[in-house]
Amino acid sequence: MPKSRKTIDPAAEAMLDKAAEMGIATAFDRADQMKPCPIGSKGLCCKNCAMGPCRLAKEGQVGICGATIETVVARNLARAIAAGAAAHSDHGRDMAFVLHGAATGEAPGYRIRDEFKLREVARDLGIDTDGRTKEEIAIEVAEKALAEFGRQSGQLSYLSRAPRKRQEIWKELNIAPRGIDREIVEILHRTVVGNDQDAEHILDQGMRAALGDGWGGSMLATDLSDILFGTPSPLVTQVNLGVLKDDEVNIIIHGHEPTLSEMIVAAARDPEMIEYAKSKGANGITLAGICCTSNETLMRQGVPSAGNFLHQELAVLTGAVEAMVVDVQCIFQGLQDVTENFHTKLITTSPKAMISGAIHMQFDEHHAPEIAREIVKTAVDNYPNRGATYIPQVHENMVPGFSHEYIRYMLGGYYRGSLRPLNDAIMSGRLRGVAGVVGCNNPRVVQDEAHSHIVREFLKNDVLVVQTGCGALCSAKYGLLQGEALEYAGPGLREICETVGIPPILHMGSCVDNSRILTVLAEMATEGGLGDDISDIPGVGIAPEWMSEKALTIGTYFVASGAYVLFGVRSPIEGSEAVTDLIGRRWEEKTGGKLEFEPDPAKIVQKSLDHIDKKRAALGLPKYDASRFGQSGDRRYNAWLRAQAEGAKVSPYSMAGVTVKEA
Ligand code: BF8
């Protein structure tokens, strides 16, 4: 373990040493210096009106309006869920505007890349496609998508993608979202002073708004991005700070929305621009991503990743970054201070996110290629200003791009694409279950440590892992998103992965792409053999190092969809036992899913495996037994092949000294 105990990543460790040497503060240092507020961190601070803020530090204390601890804690959680849903969903809205512009020709540079997906989305939105051009369909898809945000009654169109039983549960609980924006607004209304003061009722609306994100805003963001930029399929790329090049112009693209970054990719690959970079003394242009912009561009364009959330300042510290180009979400204001120590230009691009002191080059989809070229040119022009550089030579190969469409394809080809083999593997016990391990880094805990521990334990226990966001980039940094990671896998998981030809952890995209995981869960539930609802599936969702309100929204929509979700770090509702019980026991009674906060990664693993085993038992599946399939995989098969070549008449199973027991 590195000496500072701030990270397990050797590249980050090297850069933190560099920062200390230069006297430059990063989020890691600020986290040391800024102790969390003991009242606010437990959800006990109410600042919803000017009679307060009220700090409810003692058992039984109430605010000036009489609000109880339970109400205050629930209101704070609901507001966080609303903020997260707003961020994801606004991202989805922007994608709809770009699709509209691409179809009408008002957004030159964009085009419809996946017509098949366009037609599929059109069908799910109830749009007639017969005899119509893709542009005509796309215009109506964009309009219908935009209408989902402003919808006032009925329910979101994509809810019909959920298993029938789940749809009935939502209806019964009255939490089926009517419109994406409406549910977010209603949380703000309900939590304004003197309004909804029943914790369960407040958090029912939290679930409703979160579902509007998961099955609405985020799902639309994913779908429309696929239509515009292509549905991902696996490719090989690299990750970590070592992807930056000492002799090339380095541009970091950081944030979330793929609209500008896709154009920057095109501009940076333009031979004329590369020649221009050479005229400035560089050998070329390297683009690298951070955070979810990275996930978006690496899974579609193979753009390497400079790392996850806490790498943003560390990348600048290399002294080798000509421009840090940011759009929305997860962008530290501290970047501005760090860039001032180097030649790096911090360029903000979104009309929604400016940073004092940064250069603002506003993105507009109607002129995207020109703006992207201007940004890349600004970076190239900055290359001669570069001083000393220090790039840690640490990087790994990774295989991202497992969209749900590709997972279906890889399990059955074009004509038999389905999740049947996945369900069968769980039913037979080769796979114990499935886990989504997602979310952020948080400097309150050692960077990547919990993520890394949890996914390795799952692999060892034959749990297939899917990942998104910064969690996926974490695993990638340690070589876990490639076939070599099979050495950590249990025998059943190993055999499945070798048969299908996949790594044991599947990168499914950015944080809005958690909607892809919803789709997979829905299809697993309807495929047969694992019950008839998401809550029946032996699976869990985990955000080990979460920090963003968006993570709370994601967790909540998974719970409301029937999943058991565990968050690490700390509990933002610790101040109320009643709310802790509400989102755990009570939500499980209502939805079949539950939300828990558990800071200890080892306990997260144990609780997850217990839950998976409980769900297996409820389905009447054989008890998971790690020894049942012996030492499966290529090692045994290769040994068997060798024995065959030598004339021995033995079965691959007996080669491993095991008897395959019947289910
Ligand atoms: O949306 S995982 S730190 S980058 S919030 Fe942010 Fe968290 Fe990373 Fe993607 Ni998601």
Image (cartoon, helix red, strand yellow):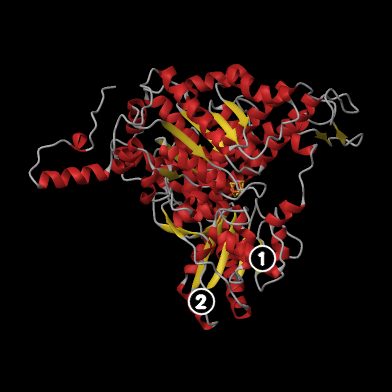
Say above or below: 600 vs 100: above
Camera-nearest residue between 126 and 124: 124
Can you tell which quarter of the image residue 372 is in?
bottom right
Q: Which residue is mark 2?
A: 247
Whether residue 130 is visible here, answered yes or no, is: yes
Mark 1: which secondary structure?
A: helix
Q: Which mark is residue 19?
A: 1
Mark 2: which secondary structure?
A: loop
Disc 2 marks a residue whose amino acid type is Asp
Among the two numbered marks 2 and 1 on one chain, the one whose residue lies closer to the N terminus: 1
Query: What is the tally of numbered marks visible in this picture?
Result: 2
Judged left or right of residue 161, residue 405 is left
Q: Residue at x 62, y 20 (%)?
A: 585
**The C terminus: image quadrant:** top left
Residue 262 image offset from top left, x and y in percent: 52, 58
Disc 1 marks a residue whose amino acid type is Ala
| Inter-mark Cα distance, 2 to 1 | 22 Å
Residue 416 image offset from top left, x and y in percent: 29, 35
Q: Nearer the viewer, mark 2 or mark 1?
A: 1
Camera-nearest residue between 475 and 202: 475
Can you tell which quarter of the image residue 592 is in?
top right
Mark 2, other Cα within 10 Å: few <14 / some 14–19 / many ≥20? some
